Image (cartoon, rainbow, N blue to C red):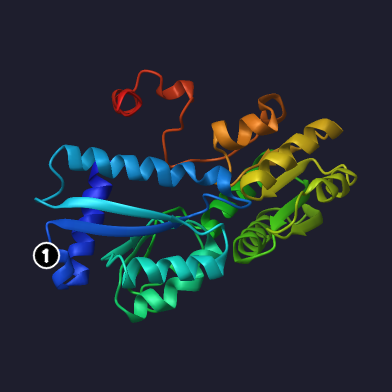
């Protein structure tokens, strides 16, 4: 997260909230994160964001305000996300919810937050429902939309692997279904000869996706759209490697963290996978001499 982004976000929170709480010297923000559960590998996001705001405070805050980010565990469970979000607003008096993770989790609290005119800022999920100001004026997406990202990957497949045979692993919720649908629509438009030969869903409560990957690999597809998250991404990459299935793999933004997802999967198994990121990834040699990255490491 860049300083300008944080400054704009906090300015929006102060302007939109309009309550006495925002006039206090300390600005309280809240978020929920999967510190436990099937997506706990992604919880590093919340830890880094908490440290970032501490750095801002150490430098005097923003416009005289110290920022307190309360980051609570929702276990990647929508009911728990609702419970924790209500606690943040009604007990902790957060003026905004910032960067909570998960499509189903954010969707579960979206109506509540908009009804109370509480900003739901930089949602760490990319469904189009979080970029609909007419319906939800207090919600702002913080990521490239699933539909946009999936369409970009479909274009790459159409350009570089014409007539592709595609296998899809997807999370059986709004995230996975929207991602699959957008990819399929764009691929069909660009390359009618390409075919999705198999698509296997999984539930976030499942212990493993090994059986789904075995079934997908048996199709001999030459493209693997791995629309999963957390431990399931690691499992899918590792299993594909064990099976010797070397299809061109695509990973969504948020499913490509090196320390917590790719390393557990085996970096050799992840070689050649295509993904995208809006951030500077820890351990990526591209940023080895980047001043801002080095400053973060030293903080």
Quadrant of residue 187 within the rendered picture: bottom right
Quadrant of residue 15 within the rendered picture: bottom left
The residue that appears at 30% across and 72% down in the rendered structure is 118
For the C terminus, which image quadrant? top left
For the N terminus, which image quadrant? top left
For residue 161, say whether it is visible. no
Q: Is residue 159 left or right of residue 285?
A: right
Direction left: furthest residue: 64
Quadrant of residue 22 within the rendered picture: bottom left
Q: Is residue 106 left or right of residue 5?
A: right
The residue that appears at 12% across and 57% down in the rendered structure is 25
Relative height, residue 290 to residue 221 (above, below): above
Q: Give 153 or 77, whichever is nearer the viewer.
A: 77
User: Label 1: how many residues lie within 10 Å, few (<14), some (14-19) or many (20+)?
Assistant: few
Q: According to the image, label 1 marks what residue?
A: 23
Q: Is residue 151 left or right of residue 171?
A: left
For residue 113, say whether it is visible. yes
Q: Secondary structure at mark 1?
A: helix
The residue that appears at 15% across and 46% down in the rendered structure is 61
Direction right: furthest residue: 218
Q: Position of residue 254 (x, y in %)?
A: 53, 46
Q: Position of residue 34 (x, y in %)?
A: 52, 53
Q: Position of residue 69 (x, y in %)?
A: 31, 52
Direction top: furthest residue: 289
Q: What is the tally of numbered marks visible in this picture? A: 1
Relative height, residue 174 to residue 171 (above, below): below
Q: Position of residue 171 (x, y in %)?
A: 68, 58
Direction front: furthest residue: 91
Q: Give 248 or 260, whichever is nearer the viewer.
A: 260
Q: Give 255 or 29, whichever is nearer the viewer.
A: 29
Q: Is residue 241 left or right of residue 249?
A: right
Relative height, residue 135 to residue 65 (above, below): below
């Amino acid at each position: 997260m860049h300083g300008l982004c944080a400054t704009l976000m906090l300015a929006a929170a102060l302007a939109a909230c309009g309550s006495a709480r925002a006039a206090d010297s300390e600005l309280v923000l809240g978020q929920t994160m999967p510190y436990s559960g099937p997506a706990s590998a992604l919880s590093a996001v919340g830890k880094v964001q908490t440290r970032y705001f501490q750095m801002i405070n150490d430098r005097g805050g923003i416009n005289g305000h110290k920022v307190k980010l309360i980051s609570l565990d929702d276990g990647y469970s929508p009911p728990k996300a609702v419970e924790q979000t209500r606690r943040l607003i009604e007990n902790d008096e957060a003026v905004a919810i910032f960067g909570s993770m998960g499509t189903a989790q954010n969707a579960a609290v979206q109506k509540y937050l908009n009804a109370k005119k509480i900003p739901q800022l930089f949602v760490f999920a990319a469904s189009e429902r979080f970029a609909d100001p007419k319906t939800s004026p207090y919600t702002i997406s913080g990521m490239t939309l699933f539909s946009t990202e999936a369409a970009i990957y479909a274009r790459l497949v159409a350009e570089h692997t014409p007539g592709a045979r595609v296998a899809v692993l997807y999370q059986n919720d709004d995230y996975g279904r929207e991602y699959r649908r957008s990819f399929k629509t764009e691929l069909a438009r660009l390359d009618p000869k390409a075919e999705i030969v198999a698509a296997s869903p999984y539930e976030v409560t499942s212990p493993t996706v090994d059986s789904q990957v075995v079934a997908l690999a048996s199709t001999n597809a030459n493209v693997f759209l791995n629309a999963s998250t957390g431990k399931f991404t690691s499992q899918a990459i590792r299993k594909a490697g064990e099976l010797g299935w070397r299809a061109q793999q695509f990973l969504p933004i948020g499913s490509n963290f090196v320390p917590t997802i790719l390393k557990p999967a085996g970096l050799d198994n992840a070689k050649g996978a295509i993904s995208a990121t809006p951030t500077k990834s820890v351990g990526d040699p591209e940023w080895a001499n980047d001043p801002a990255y080095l400053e973060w490491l030293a903080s």
